[in-house]
Image: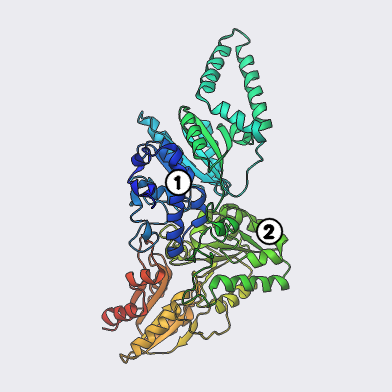
């Protein structure tokens, strides 16, 4: 008979500290089992969190949290952190509506100081916390955990540069789980790291510095010579000279799954009051064979069978997705157009560019987590006659907003932005919902913005975009159609909407994913003897003003439906047109998402909550429009 699980004894990090160091590896195994069991049911970021279990244990074992602070960059490594901070009983609700978030969330726990989900932000926030601590004459510790991919983001390097300059007491844990930044040099490297992490060594080092500086005339020369000798040895033996040059003391690489070594190193380094970078090497997907063998596939996964690692089929699994349609069509277009190139910011599989990469590797640019650079790169390629396609999630395109305006649209360059995950993405929650792109794109001069109603229409729009002389944005949702009806499709003409159904009582004008909803609403209204014109807007910008003027001569009732924030969205553009043309007597209703950060939950659940189901839309129309 087995004894009680260690994991069940932990209600907070104070309980963790009562567990003997020798038993922490058993705790790590129990945490991994809990993570695998939950993510297999709910989906989530499996491989990153499995790789960071020992880091979470060691940090909470050494630090006095929440007085001391742990910041998790992006946050998809933080499942063990959630379990260790009193959320074990709620962990089974991970990513479920009303349950705990898949990312750190400051409304969920005092141990989550920020709500996060985007990469490369943590060092900047950590430095701000350190500066605030010093202003307040406090002495708490701040540890930042950042992955090797996130460290490549420009914001992270800006923060490293500033932190080294300010010399604040800040510890950065570099979780290197894909590849080592540089090869560790055997036993000698490990030995040297143990020496320089030792508090006795650092005390002697400080005393020697002070002594050398006191020597008349030659003191500073001797100090500089000693520093050069130390740095020269570290440059030969330790792959951290870049961080040293930025002003950080570098320690590593060390085994990120060796808890005693992690705990010992962290305890020693907590005595230092300066910028420190600890390079920790871990195995992404550690403890689950299928995740270790396929870390990219299990980085963010849907529900799967633990025994085989195979995904669990859903009702929509067999349908063509928007992402799949994009991936297929861009390969077809690239075969005919040698000037077509593709750009992604570390989202090769997620955006559907994996097949393009396999077939045209020299024409694919994966720039890492650097959306600003991705757009600047596209600008340069377009200036020399190439046709760049930037494939990016809506929520991450926000990070390149200035580059969209300054580097692409101001120059009126033919860059195509293929914006995946536009609208509600579901379980990843507020940091990942793509509900603001219509509002932040439609006012930019020169930019054409389109939204397809189906995967088939996306293919047609992508091909059409290559005929345009200026910048184009195509926004489309995650997954496939809800109802899987094969919708009719007319040829695409510049700036022209598509009329799918004629009716005299009102006009339903829908954007992209909402077109099939509008057709269902039209069917429901017909049961009430109300007949509607259904319009597939196609073009968010420019509006098909000629069509709108024609429609509003036949009916004064108009309803716009969009999977995005209403404020500043497509419906707002329609109202601006009505006001600009001084069309009187119009009763307009704008339906979409509120001006809020939408919580996590399945897309269907969120549509239900925010009254964007066909049934709810019909009810609103009958009560508020067709009075």
- 21 and 110: which one is in front? 21
Q: CA distance from mark 2 to mark 1?
A: 53 Å
Q: What kind of element bears circle 1?
A: helix
- Residue 463 visible, this angle: yes
Query: Crowding at label 1, few (<14), some or many (≥20) Cα neighbours within 10 Å?
Result: few
The quadrant in which residue 57 appears is top left
Location of residue 359 in the rendering, given as x and y in whole percent from the top left corner: 71, 67
Question: Is 565 left, or right, of 397 in this rendering?
Answer: left
From this viewpoint, which residue is outermost toward the front? 1
Location of residue 193 in the rendering, given as x and y in whole percent from the top left corner: 58, 30
The residue under the point 45% across, 65% down is 425
- 87 and 26: which one is in front? 26
**CB contact under 8 Å: marks 2 and 1:** no
The residue under the point 33% across, 73% down is 611
Question: Which residue position holds label 2?
Answer: 381
Which is in the foreground here, disc 2 or disc 1? 1
Of labels 2 and 1, earlier in sequence is: 1
Q: Is residue 180 above or below residue 406?
A: above
Location of residue 274 in the rendering, given as x and y in whole percent from the top left corner: 49, 29
- Residue 345 visible, this angle: no
Location of residue 45 in the rendering, given as x and y in whole percent from the top left corner: 48, 57
Query: Crowding at label 2, few (<14), some or many (≥20) Cα neighbours within 10 Å?
Result: some
The residue under the point 42% across, 42% down is 70
Task: Count up the numbered dots.
Answer: 2
From this viewpoint, which residue is outermost toward the top? 216
Question: Which residue position holds label 1?
Answer: 26
The quadrant in which residue 464 appears is bottom right
Name the colouring of the figure: rainbow
């Amino acid at each position: 008979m087995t004894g009680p699980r260690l994991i069940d004894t932990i209600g907070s990090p104070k309980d963790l500290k009562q567990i003997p160091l020798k038993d922490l590896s058993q705790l790590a195994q129990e945490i991994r089992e809990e993570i695998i069991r939950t993510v297999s049911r709910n989906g989530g970021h499996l491989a990153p969190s499995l790789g960071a279990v020992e880091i979470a244990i060691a940090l909470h074992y050494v630090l006095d949290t929440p007085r001391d602070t742990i910041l998790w960059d992006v946050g998809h490594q933080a499942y063990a952190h959630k379990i260790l901070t009193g959320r074990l009983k709620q962990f089974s609700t991970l990513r479920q509506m009303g349950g705990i978030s898949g990312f750190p969330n400051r409304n969920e726990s005092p141990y989550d100081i920020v709500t996060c989900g985007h990469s490369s932000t943590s060092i900047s926030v950590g430095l701000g916390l350190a500066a605030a601590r010093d202003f307040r004459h406090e002495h708490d510790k701040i540890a930042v955990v950042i992955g090797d991919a996130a460290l490549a983001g420009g914001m992270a390097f800006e923060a490293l540069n500033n932190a080294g300059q300010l010399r604040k007491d800040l510890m950065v844990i570099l979780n290197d789980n894909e590849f080592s930044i540089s090869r560790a040099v055997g036993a000698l490297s490990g030995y040297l790291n143990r020496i320089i992490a030792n508090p006795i060594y650092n005390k002697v080092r400080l005393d020697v510095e002070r002594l050398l500086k006191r020597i008349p005339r030659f003191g500073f020369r001797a100090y500089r010579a000693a520093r050069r000798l130390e740095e020269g040895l570290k440059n030969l033996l330790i792959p951290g000279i870049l961080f040293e040059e930025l002003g950080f003391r570098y320690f590593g690489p060390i085994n990120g799954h060796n808890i005693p070594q992690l705990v010992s190193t962290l305890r020693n380094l907590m005595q230092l009051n300066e910028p420190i970078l600890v390079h920790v090497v871990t195995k992404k997907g550690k403890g689950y064979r299928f995740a270790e063998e396929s870390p990219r596939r299990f980085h963010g996964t849907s529900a799967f069978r633990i025994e085989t690692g195979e995904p669990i089929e859903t009702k929509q699994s067999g349908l063509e997705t928007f992402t799949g349609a994009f991936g297929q069509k861009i390969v077809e277009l690239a075969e005919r157009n040698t000037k077509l190139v593709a750009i992604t910011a570390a989202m090769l599989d997620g955006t559907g560019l994996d097949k393009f990469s396999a077939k045209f590797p020299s024409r694919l640019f994966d720039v890492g987590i650097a959306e600003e650079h991705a757009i600047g790169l596209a600008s340069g390629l377009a200036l020399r006659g190439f046709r760049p396609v930037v494939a990016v999630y809506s929520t991450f395109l926000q990070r390149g907003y200035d580059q969209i305006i300054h580097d692409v649209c101001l120059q009126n360059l033919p860059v195509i932005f293929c914006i995946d995950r536009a609208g509600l993405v579901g379980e990843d929650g507020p940091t990942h919902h793509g509900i603001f792109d219509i509002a932040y794109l439609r006012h930019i001069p020169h930019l054409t913005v389109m939204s397809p109603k189906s995967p088939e229409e996306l293919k047609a729009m992508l091909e059409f975009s290559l005929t345009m002389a200026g910048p184009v944005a195509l926004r489309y949702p995650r997954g496939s159609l809800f109802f899987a009806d094969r919708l009719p499709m007319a040829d695409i003409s510049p700036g022209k909407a598509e009329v799918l159904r004629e009716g005299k009582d009102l006009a339903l004008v829908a954007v992209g994913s909402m077109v099939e909803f509008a057709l269902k609403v039209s069917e429901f209204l017909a049961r009430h003897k109300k007949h509607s014109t259904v319009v597939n807007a196609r073009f968010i910008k420019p509006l098909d003003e000629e069509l709108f003027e024609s429609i509003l001569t036949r009916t004064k009732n108009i309803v716009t439906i969009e999977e995005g924030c209403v404020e500043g969205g497509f419906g707002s553009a329609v109202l601006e047109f009505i006001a600009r043309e001084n069309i009187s007597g119009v009763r307009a209703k704008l339906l979409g998402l509120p001006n809020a950060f939408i919580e996590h939950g399945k897309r269907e659940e969120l549509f239900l909550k925010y009254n964007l189901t066909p049934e709810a839309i019909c009810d609103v129309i009958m009560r508020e429009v067709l009075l």
